[in-house]
C-alpha cells in the first residue's frame, strides 16, 4: 500500500463497530482512517485524499446527514455510504438525493458494504481524473494568444479558413498558421477533438454568417 492508494474514511461513534469496520476494510486491502465524530473528521481530513466516506447517520453532535451537507457546501465531493440502525425511508431518500452512494442498515452485510466501497472509490477516481483532465485543458487553452482563441472559436463553429480570414481581416495563410498553433497547443489531432475540447471548456457558440 502507498500513500496514493484510496482511503476509506470511517465516521462511527460506536467503538466496537468502528473497529469491526476497520478490520473488514483492511482485510480487503483498503487504507482506513477512523473518526468518532463528524467534527473529528472535518478537522483531520486531507482534501487531497482520494477515496470514500462511511458514516453513521446518528452521531454525537453533528449528524451524518449534516456532515454530508457541510461537505457539499465546502465543495468537497467524496462518495458517501451511510449506515444506520434507525434508518427510515425519508432519511434514505434525503441522503441519496444529496449524492450518497448507498444507505445500509445495521447489521451491515460485509459483502454489500465492500461492494459499495468499491463502487464509491471507482467513482472517486473517475471524478478526480475528470477534474485533472479539465484543469489540463484549461491550462492548454490559457496558453493560446487572444488571436488563437478567436480563430479556435471560429474553427469549431465550422468556418473554413477563407471564411475566418474574411471575418477576422487577416490572410488565409495567417489563419492556417494560427489554426496549426491552436491544434498543437490544445493537443488536438483532429477537428473533432478540438470541438470536444471547446465543448468541455464551455466556449460560446458562434453563429455562422
Image (cartoon, rainbow, N blue to C red):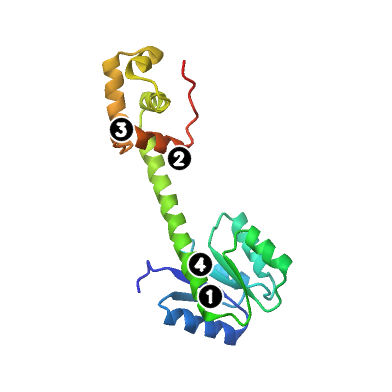
**Does residue 191 sit above or below 15 in this rendering?**
above
Residue located farthest toward the bottom when viewing the structure as drawn = 16
Q: Quadrant of the N terminus?
A: bottom left
Q: Distance between the Cα atoms at labels 3 and 2?
A: 16 Å
SS category of the residue bearing label 1? helix
Label 4 neighbour load within 10 Å: few <14, some 14-19, many 20+: many
Residue under label 1, please give it: 113
Q: Distance between the Cα atoms at labels 3 and 4?
A: 38 Å
Q: 33 and 130: which one is in front? A: 130
Label 3 neighbour load within 10 Å: few <14, some 14-19, many 20+: some
The image quadrant of residue 70 is bottom right
Q: 113 and 25: which one is in front? A: 113
Sequence-wise, which precedes: disc 3 or disc 2?
A: 3
Label 2 neighbour load within 10 Å: few <14, some 14-19, many 20+: few
Q: Distance between the Cα atoms at labels 1 and 4?
A: 12 Å
The image quadrant of residue 153 is top left
Amino acid at each position: 500500500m502507498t500513500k496514493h492508494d484510496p482511503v476509506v474514511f470511517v465516521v462511527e461513534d460506536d467503538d466496537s463497530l468502528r473497529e469491526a469496520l476497520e478490520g473488514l476494510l483492511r482485510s480487503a486491502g483498503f487504507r482506513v482512517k477512523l473518526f468518532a465524530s463528524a467534527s473529528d473528521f472535518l478537522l483531520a481530513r486531507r482534501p487531497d485524499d482520494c477515496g470514500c466516506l462511511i458514516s453513521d447517520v446518528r452521531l454525537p453532535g453533528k449528524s451524518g446527514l449534516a456532515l454530508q451537507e457541510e461537505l457539499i457546501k465546502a465543495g468537497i465531493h467524496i462518495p458517501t455510504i451511510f449506515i444506520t440502525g434507525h434508518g427510515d425511508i425519508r432519511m434514505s431518500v434525503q441522503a441519496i438525493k444529496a449524492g450518497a452512494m448507498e444507505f445500509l442498515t445495521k447489521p451491515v452485510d460485509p459483502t454489500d458494504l465492500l461492494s459499495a466501497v468499491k463502487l464509491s472509490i471507482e467513482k472517486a477516481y473517475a471524478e478526480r481524473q475528470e477534474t485533472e483532465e479539465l484543469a489540463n485543458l484549461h491550462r492548454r487553452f490559457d496558453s493560446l494568444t487572444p488571436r488563437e482563441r478567436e480563430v479556435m472559436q471560429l474553427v469549431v463553429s465550422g468556418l473554413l479558413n477563407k471564411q475566418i480570414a474574411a471575418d477576422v481581416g487577416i490572410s488565409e495563410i495567417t489563419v492556417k498558421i494560427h489554426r496549426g498553433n491552436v491544434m498543437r497547443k490544445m493537443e488536438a489531432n483532429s477537428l473533432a477533438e478540438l470541438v470536444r475540447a471547446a465543448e468541455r471548456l464551455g466556449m460560446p457558440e458562434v453563429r455562422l454568417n
